Amino acid sequence: MSKPLIGVTTYLDRARWGVWDMRAALLPAPYPRLVQESGGIAVMLPPDAPEAAAAVVARLDGVVIAGGADVEPVRYGAEPDSRTGPPARERDGWELALIDAALSAGTPLLGICRGMQLLNVALGGTLVQHLDGHVEAVGVIGRHAVKPVPGSRYASLVPELAEVPTYHHQAVDRLGAGLAASAHAEDGTVEAVELAAPAWALGVQWHPEMGEDLRVMRGLVEAAEAASSTVGRA
């Protein structure tokens, strides 16, 4: 059986390497490492025309919406807070289209940090534009405890209170349609969201790629493997 093909979205930003200084599609190396160590094949999904999303998802067994810039508040009907970062409109449009395509096709979907927030927004939810205590320092990954909601998909993957790598200043406010909170921080912040079965759609507010715990990504990869077997792509 071939390994499932997992698409991971990318940044689109200016970067420098060697003699070059230009706009680039970027993906921190821990993302593909996590996919690979969890049993999948990672492919990068740089921003594209939203109308291409369904055709892209049709070629994949699973989708990861990676972390990154704050979601533009207009996407959830809010005015920008002074502490909200500059928008990444190309990513917002592309990734919202990927989420819609994955949910429509029943393709397993994992949102990480920004990706969880975007999943919530895609389903009509809203965000808290700033909260304190979830960033240790600028450019420094912190850690805090996350408690699973019993009976949730997340709890089936990680049943215990777990310390997770964290770096975010925004969070879920009103949950999107069909989403349920499946983990919380000690201060009550929603740390994971999911759709009910049979859909496999999970969002986590932390950064599993910055740790060694494979269980969340392995859950996506195993769901992608099962789905590809069902449609005869294995």
Image (tube, rainbow, N blue to C red):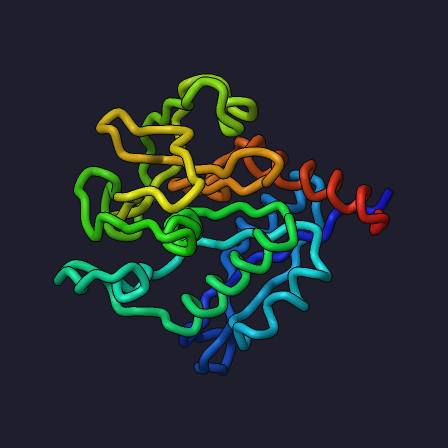
**In this picture, residue 233 sits left or right of residue 75:** right
Classify 81 as above or below 39: below
Residue 3 coordinates in the image, percent (x, y): 78, 46
Q: Quadrant of the N terminus?
A: top right
**In this picture, residue 130 sits left or right of residue 20:** left
* Towards the viewer: 152 or 221: 152
Residue at left offset 38%, top offset 33%: 181
Residue 12 coordinates in the image, percent (x, y): 45, 71
Residue at left offset 51%, top offset 65%: 97
Residue at left offset 50%, top offset 29%: 154
Count of marks, rendered view: 0
Picture quadrant of residue 7: bottom right
Q: Residue furthest left?
A: 82
* Towards the viewer: 26 or 108: 108
Picture quadrant of residue 207: top left
**In this picture, residue 185 sits left or right of residue 3:** left
Residue 115 coordinates in the image, percent (x, y): 44, 52
Q: Residue furthest front?
A: 177
Residue at left offset 42%, top offset 23%: 148
Residue 116 coordinates in the image, percent (x, y): 42, 47
